[in-house]
């Protein structure tokens, strides 16, 4: 299950989360974001209980996007224990995403 984030919920849902969190920074008009969306959904289902997956619309939540210096989308950031651990930019293959998140799962 994917969580829809807002600037207001970011602290609680991501930074205070007990599980590692994959945050998808995206926008409605972004075609590469749409292309990677199914991979993000698949990861959310596959890693349920081990990884939290959240989406943040950068157009309506510019504070969080600015704070993490999101320059291009899609950008996926992996957080663990409230810290930014890794970042993936662009529409990449699902296996690449899985490889990146694998090292942060307990």
Image (spheres, rainbow, N blue to C red):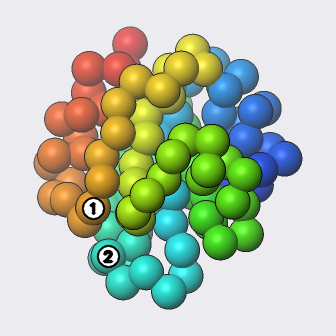
**x 16%, y 58%: residue:** 93
- Please name whichever residue, 89 or 92, is drawn nearer the observer in this view of the structure: 89
Label 2 packing within 10 angstroms: few (<14), some (14-19), many (20+): some
Pointer 1 residue? 90
Give left or right: position of 13 versus 40: right
Q: How many marks?
A: 2
Give left or right: position of 103 versus 84: left
Label 1 packing within 10 angstroms: few (<14), some (14-19), many (20+): some
Give left or right: position of 75 versus 12: left
Q: Secondary structure at mark 2?
A: helix
Residue 32 tag number: 2
**x 35%, y 39%: residue:** 87
In which image quadrant can residue 17 be found? top right
Give left or right: position of 57 versus 60: left
Q: Percent position (x, y) of residue 85?
A: 40, 24
Q: Is residue 4 visible?
A: no
1 is higher (above) or lower (below) than 14: below
Q: Earlier in the sequence, mark 2 or mark 1?
A: 2
Q: Percent position (x, y) of residue 23?
A: 51, 46
Q: Residue furthest right?
A: 8
Q: Secondary structure at mark 1?
A: loop
- Please name whichever residue, 40 or 15, is drawn nearer the observer in this view of the structure: 15
- What quarter of the picture does the C terminus occupy? top left
Q: Is residue 21 visible?
A: yes
17 is higher (above) or lower (below) than 78: above
**x 26%, y 27%: residue:** 102
**x 16%, y 46%: residue:** 96
Q: Percent position (x, y) of residue 69?
A: 51, 46
- Mark 2 and mark 1 in contact? Answer it, CB < 8 Å: yes
């Amino acid at each position: 299950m994917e969580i829809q984030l807002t600037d207001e919920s970011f602290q609680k849902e991501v930074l205070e989360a007990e599980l590692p969190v994959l945050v998808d920074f995206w926008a409605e008009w972004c075609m590469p974001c749409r292309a990677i969306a199914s991979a993000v959904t698949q990861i959310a289902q596959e890693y349920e209980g081990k990884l939290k997956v959240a989406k943040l619309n950068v157009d309506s939540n510019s504070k969080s996007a600015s704070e993490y210096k999101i320059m291009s989308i899609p950008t996926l950031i992996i957080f663990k224990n409230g810290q930014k651990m890794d970042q993936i930019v662009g529409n990449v293959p699902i296996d690449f995403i899985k490889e990146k998140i694998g090292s942060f799962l307990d």
